[in-house]
């Protein structure tokens, strides 16, 4: 079969890898690099090179079974990062380090009146979310969850909402409308036992190395970079799908798999005839724009360097944003921050913009609607947003689902899912 794949993120690359041995594949990428939301910025500070992943960067050793298996099969090198977090409320000056896993952080719990109550609140919130996460309950919003727990205004507005908005990267004024399920999933399954934290995987040399290794392993796939798909039209008589790319080239495929996000998929299919139900399903997904800046500006960090963690959430009043300390293991001032109105980082190395789905209860309903129209006129949809909470594991999961639909006999599918 001739198969077209749109998008070179984790979903597109893994779909190509699963189908590559038995088909003739063309993979389209509209940007000038492979990887989509996996993007590495190289920053040299004081003679030390840092690989800053300003999109997807951490991969859970615990709840990423498919991705961990893929790393193993493809022998993709990775490193460990000890996950720690500091919450700094710039309005009150309060700083809280989590988990209290070093002697200093442990003693800190007792030195300021707000610290222990906030940690106990976090514990209560994680415990109350356990069942919701286990049962995949997606209808309850953060706002409703906080009402149910009878949280005080202070607990909601000075702590929980800004913390979760910063950790997830969601727009501050919409975070209460997000489902509690995605906001709490990582926290529930990575709750520190005792006083120790979790270690997460990062790719050696940045995520771009992983994407390149995937690309290098493809034998029957032609990759077209900087040539996005502009128009798609299925033919109900021939059962083929015609594709026109930005450069004006035309193609005909037996199957087309679109792994670009729903927002891009809507644009690609805007003028496609005969797929109204598909368009209706895609139009339900809503997106927001996140800006991530790689910089060396210490004003985005808690005031005392000893309080710095790998993840640092600063509550600034109108919004709360995470800054990742990419120089945590070199002790260099290399950071990447979500930036919002009023932020003006100095010593900027790079700025990226990402469109991300608003994970409200309707996001999860939209996933079910999209599922019903998969394969309409031989057009399929993959990508992180089609599965669960839109993590990299879900991008890989979407590739597995596409392969099961199109070529369930794939040997690589068996290897990946065994
Ligand atoms: C800032 C940020 C941090 C994140 N951190 C993590 C993390 O730590 N861990 C984690 O698990 N997940 C994380 N994610 C989620 C991440 O998006 C997923 O993990 C995953 O990388 C998405 O892969 P994908 O292939 O589904 O989509 P994408 O990576 O978005 O790939 C879609 C591709 O389609 C291309 N495309 C769009 N339109 C067209 C067109 N017309 N023609 C051709 N190509 C087109 C795009 O350019 C893009 O390359 C993060 C996301 C962001 C934005």
Image: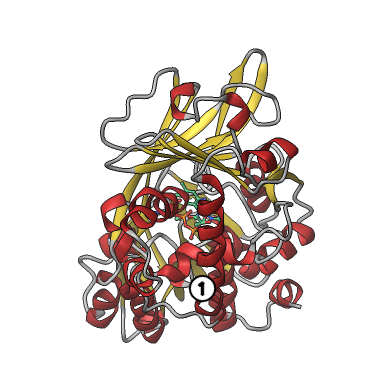
* Side (left or right) of 199 relative to 138: right
User: Element under label 1?
Assistant: helix
Q: Tell me: 152 left or right of 127.
A: left
Q: Position of residue 28 (x, y in %)?
A: 45, 54
Residue that carries the numbered disc 1 in the rendered image? 128
Residue 231 seen in the current view: no
Q: Residue furthest top?
A: 46
Residue 51 in view of the camera: yes
Question: Which quadrant is the C terminus positioned in?
Answer: bottom right
- In front here: 214 or 244? 214
Q: Going 74% across and 38% down the picture, which residue do you hit?
A: 103
Q: Position of residue 38 (x, y in %)?
A: 53, 47
Q: Is residue 32 left or right of residue 402?
A: left
Q: Nearer the viewer, residue 18 or 77?
A: 77
Residue at 34%, 35% in the rendered image:
91
Q: Quadrant of the N terminus?
A: bottom right
- Viewer-side residue, 404 vs 139: 139
Which quadrant of the structure image shows residue 406? bottom right
**x 46%, y 66%: residue:** 182
The spot of residue 84 in percent (x, y) is 63, 44
Quick check: 111 above or below 274? above
Q: Where is residue 79, by image quadrant?
A: top right
Give the class, few, some or many, for how many residues have Cα within 10 Å of label 1's Cα (few <14, many ≥20): some
- Measuring from the top left, give residue 286's x and y in whole percent: 28, 63
């Amino acid at each position: 079969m001739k198969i077209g794949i749109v998008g070179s993120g984790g979903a597109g690359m893994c779909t190509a890898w699963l189908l590559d041995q038995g088909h003739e594949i063309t993979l389209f990428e509209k940007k000038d690099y492979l990887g989509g939301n996996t993007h590495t910025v190289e920053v040299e500070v004081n003679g030390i090179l840092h690989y800053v992943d300003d999109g997807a960067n951490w991969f859970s050793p615990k709840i990423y079974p498919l991705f961990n298996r893929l790393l193993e099969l493809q022998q993709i090198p990775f490193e460990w990062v000890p996950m720690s977090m500091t919450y700094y409320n710039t309005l009150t000056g309060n700083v809280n380090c989590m988990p209290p896993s070093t002697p200093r952080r442990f003693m800190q719990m007792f030195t300021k009146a707000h610290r222990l109550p906030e940690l106990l609140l976090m514990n209560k919130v994680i415990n109350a979310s356990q069942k919701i996460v286990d049962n995949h309950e997606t209808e309850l919003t953060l706002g409703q969850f906080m009402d149910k727990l009878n949280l005080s205004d202070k607990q909601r507005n000075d702590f929980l909402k800004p913390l979760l908005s910063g950790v997830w990267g969601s727009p501050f004024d919409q975070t209460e409308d997000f489902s509690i399920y995605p906001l709490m999933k990582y926290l529930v399954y990575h709750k520190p036992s005792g006083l120790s934290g979790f270690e997460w995987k990062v790719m050696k040399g940045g995520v771009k190395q992983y994407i390149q290794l995937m690309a290098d392993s493809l034998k029957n796939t032609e990759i077209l970079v900087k040539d996005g798909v502009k128009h798609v039209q299925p033919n109900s008589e021939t059962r083929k799908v015609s594709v026109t790319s930005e450069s004006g080239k035309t193609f005909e495929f037996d199957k087309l798999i679109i792994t670009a996000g729903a927002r891009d998929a809507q644009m690609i299919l805007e003028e496609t005839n005969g797929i109204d139900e598909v368009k209706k399903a895609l139009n339900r997904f809503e997106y927001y724009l996140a800006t991530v800046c790689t910089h060396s500006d210490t004003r985005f960090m808690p005031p005392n360097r000893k309080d710095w963690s790998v993840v640092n959430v600063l509550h600034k009043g109108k919004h709360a944003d995470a800054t990742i300390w990419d120089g945590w293991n070199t002790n260099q001032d290399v950071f990447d921050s979500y930036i919002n109105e009023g932020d003006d980082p100095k010593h900027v190395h790079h700025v990226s913009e990402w469109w991300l789905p608003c994970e409200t209860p309707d996001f999860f309903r939209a996933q079910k609607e999209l599922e019903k129209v998969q394969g309409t006129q031989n057009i399929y949809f993959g990508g992180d947003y089609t599965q669960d909470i839109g993590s990299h594991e879900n991008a890989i999961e979407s590739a597995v689902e596409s392969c099961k639909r199109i070529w369930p006999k794939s040997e690589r599918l068996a290897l990946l899912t065994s």
